[in-house]
Amino acid sequence: MPSLSSRTVRRVAFVLLLLAAAAALRYFVFSTDPVPVTVTAIATGRVEQTVTNSKAGTVQTRQRASLSPEMGGLVIELPARKGARVAAGDVVLRLSDADYRAQVTLQERSIDAARAAGREACLTADQARRDDARYDALAREGVVSAELSEQARSRRDAAAAACAAAGARVLQAESALALARAQLEKTVLRAPFPGVVAELKTELGEWITPAPPGVPIPPVIELIAPEEIYVSAPLDEVDVGKVHLGQRVRITMDAFPGQGFPGRVVRVAPYVLDIQEQNRTFEIEAEFDDPAFARTLVPGASADVEVILAAKDGVLRVPTSALMEGNRVLAVEGDRLVEKTVTTGLRNWEFVEVTGGLSAGERVTVSLDRMEVKAGARVRIAGEASGPAK
């Protein structure tokens, strides 16, 4: 076999050196830096299938009253200030009542006079009845004329009528007294149920202006029953067949960030609201499991209700933020991203159940908000996301 000339050897070595230099130049100079990504390890945990309200829900109370007196007048007493607890029947406002008390006293005296006049009239009627009987007996014996007997009978009938009229005047006076007492009672505003004074819109010495007949006086006191707190929330109509009484819920509020409070569905509206046809909803009501905590809430606050339709514990799961369209994920293998398709089960906005395509311990990226994060890209792990705890 002929040997290679030294020139040929030098040429081959030079070409190899050029190729090595080109490869090194491409790797060290022209290659892109690895893309930093955040990953999460596939692990087991709890996964829920949920639906949540389409618009903000509201903390409400089953008993809430806007109270106003039935008549105008000067405010002379406010026993319950804002935030005070009251029992059913407690006085929460009193108006000046001197005139009405005087009317009550006047009618009480009128009753006394009517009763006295009635007793006098009835005594006269009794006497006339006895006189009539006596004249009737004497007329039958011929001692007195029939004319005198008839006169006695007329006096008897007139006296009986006067007695009856006196009795009617007593009843009339009693009715007038009842009316005066009713008017007096209207100067007092009482709590219709046990609750807390949430708002007070008048003060001592202020005048509450009377309203025309049939028009209520504007409310001056807001009363709520904190023992009957619940959350009302609208859900999208597509979920109307999924939600039922007794289902578990998780309630969240802006006032308690990062916290979820357990409860249950206590009412599902039997109809869909179509006020806005492009966004039809149905209402649900949810109560808290902890009534003591519920009593601390303020009606009117916003709240979200997440209805738990189904749940599984101890299943493989991946953060929902790691899942791309078509149930695809980008797994990290070595220093490269590899696209994988997974089969899924239950899901919500936090986690998706993985039933196939991934194994426990594999790492997938949740950094899907950048164009350079794609299958085949070189990556370096910049951090690990554990995901929300369940």
Image (cartoon, helix red, strand yellow):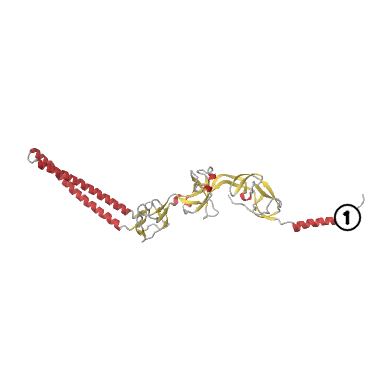
Please say whether residue 338 is visible from this viewpoint: yes
| Dot 1 amino acid type | Val
Q: Position of residue 355 (x, y in %)?
A: 63, 43
Toward which corner of the image does residue 239 lie, by quadrant? Answer: top right
Toward which corner of the image does residue 103 lie, by quadrant? Answer: bottom left
Q: Position of residue 101 (x, y in %)?
A: 29, 56
- Report the front residue among 293 and 332: 332
Tell me the residue at 62%/51% (across/down). Answer: 321
Q: Position of residue 78 (x, y in %)?
A: 37, 58
* Mark 1 Cα shell of 10 Å, populated few (<14), some (14-19), many (≥20): few
- Relative side of 28 to 2, left or right: left
Which residue in the structure is indicated by mark 1? 9
Pick out the residue farthest to the right.
2
- Relative side of 295 to 149, left or right: right
Please say whether residue 361 is visible from this viewpoint: no
Q: State the SS at label 1.
A: helix
Q: Position of residue 222 (x, y in %)?
A: 41, 54
Establish if 208 lies above or below 163: below
Toward which corner of the image does residue 96 lie, by quadrant? Answer: bottom left
